Amino acid sequence: MRLTHVTTAELDRLEFHAVHSGEHGRIAARLLDLANRVDAGSEVTRAELFVRAGEQWEIAQEFERARAAYQRAIDDGGPTVVDAHALSAGALLQLDERRQAEAHLERLEAGEPAGLATHIHVAEVLYAHGDLEGAERWATNGARRHVGRTLGPHERDLFLELLRIRFRVRSDLGRAEDDLDLLLDQG
């Protein structure tokens, strides 16, 4: 088996092709193949390739395959943009495996603090599945962790996105504006 180096540009090209061609399953399979052959010095980690394959499987409505790809990312243990436990929970909810999904989210909460992208993903997934209380909790916890920190431009965009999701959830719950909601006005 020949090891390969995967660049962010190559990953972007594959995902761009999937969007324009609709060949999400084929691209997911390609990403899995790359993950199995990626070298240790690759720009894109093996775990991130498993995650990206899972995302393509989800778009293709292949939730069991997505869950399996996310599990491989979890088992790999490498860094990913969105924690694979959060992604796996989303796929499990699509498969109506609520208890298993909750177990992934509990592991995530008990571990190292999750990043903004992970909080956004969990809040959106819980919102989409009707768990408004859980969505608000995840969005609030993520936002509170980052209030007052110096954020770079990308992190600032993610922070504002999380605040917007939180505001939408809180509006649906009929909650009054609070200090975090007011941060949106400062944009």
Image (cartoon, rainbow, N blue to C red):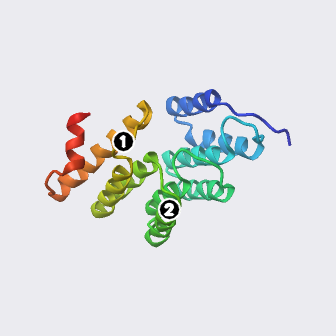
Q: Is residue 129 left or right of residue 53?
A: left
Query: Secondary structure beneath disc 1?
Result: helix
Q: Nearer the viewer, residue 183 or 96?
A: 183
Q: Please, is residue 2 above or below residue 107 in the view?
A: above
* Image quadrant occupied by the N terminus: top right
Mark 1 packing: few (<14 Cα in 10 Å), some, or many (20+)? many
Q: In terms of image quadrants, where is residue 18? A: top right
SS of the residue under disc 2:
helix
Near-viewer residue (16 or 71): 71
Q: Is residue 137 left or right of residue 39?
A: left
* Residue 51, image x, y percentages: 58, 48
**Residue flagged by tag 2: what amino acid is it?**
Leu
Q: Horizontal and vertical percent for residue 62?
A: 54, 53
Q: Depth check: 146 or 142 in front? A: 146
**Residue denoted by label 2:** 108
Q: Residue at x 41, y 55 (%)?
A: 122
Side (left or right) of 1 relative to 154: right
